[in-house]
Image (cartoon, helix red, strand yellow):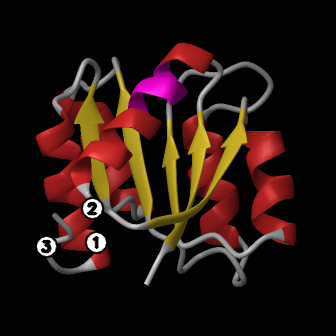
Amino acid sequence: MAWNILLVDDSRTVKAVIAKSLAMSGVPVGTLFDAGNGIEALAILRREKVDLAVADINMPIMGGMELVAEMKRDPSLAGIPIVIISTEGSATRLRELETMGINGFLRKPFQPEALKKILDSILGGDHA
């Protein structure tokens, strides 16, 4: 099964690195959606079938924390797994994100193998 994945980050470079890491991980990707902030992400989530969202915390207009909160409030989006990839990763912030219901966290910069491990735990199985 190919997974539809939404990348939410205001940096094109970071999204390119995540996309390359996804390709290297062996995770079968169907459609890779792209959003520059939480508002754009919500629009995509509400019109497309997305199996997993990967988001940054710090973005203009609507950041990752607000995106997670909005997704969890919307019954049609609440079940979509969310992975946060960010430079911000204090213990307090991680506890807050876990309480909000994220499924995984990676600190930038990250190794592709670390992303693969998180995706395998969320999506199931070994894809390589």
Callout 1 amino acid:
Ile
- Which amino acid lies under the numbered mark 2 shown in the image of this protein? Leu
- CA neighbours of label 2 inside 10 A, class few (<14), some (14 to 19), many (20+): many
User: How many residues crowd mark 3 within 10 Å: few (<14), some (14–19), many (20+)?
Assistant: few
- Along the viewing direction, whichever of 27 and 68 lies nearer the viewer: 27
Quadrant assignment, res 46: bottom right
Dot 3: element: loop
Residue matched to label 1: 122
The residue indicated by pointer 3 is: 126
Q: Which residues are magenta?
A: 14-18
Q: Amino acid at mark 3?
A: Asp
Helix, strand or loop at label 2? It is: helix
What's the residue at 53%, 80% (across, down)? 79
C-alpha gap between disc 1 and disc 3: 11 Å
The residue carrying mark 2 is 119
Instruction: Single out the mark in the foreground, 1 or 3.
Output: 3
Q: Do residues under tags 2 and 1 come within 8 Å of each other at their CB atoms?
A: yes
The residue shown at (65%, 63%) is 71
Whether residues under marks 1 and 3 lie with C-beta atoms below 8 angstroms apart, the answer is no
For the N terminus, which image quadrant?
bottom left
Disc marking residue 21: none
Please determine whether, in this image, residue 69 is positioned above or below residue 91: below
Residue 104 quadrant: bottom left
Q: Is residue 41 left or right of residue 64?
A: right
Q: Position of residue 34 (x, y in %)?
A: 69, 41
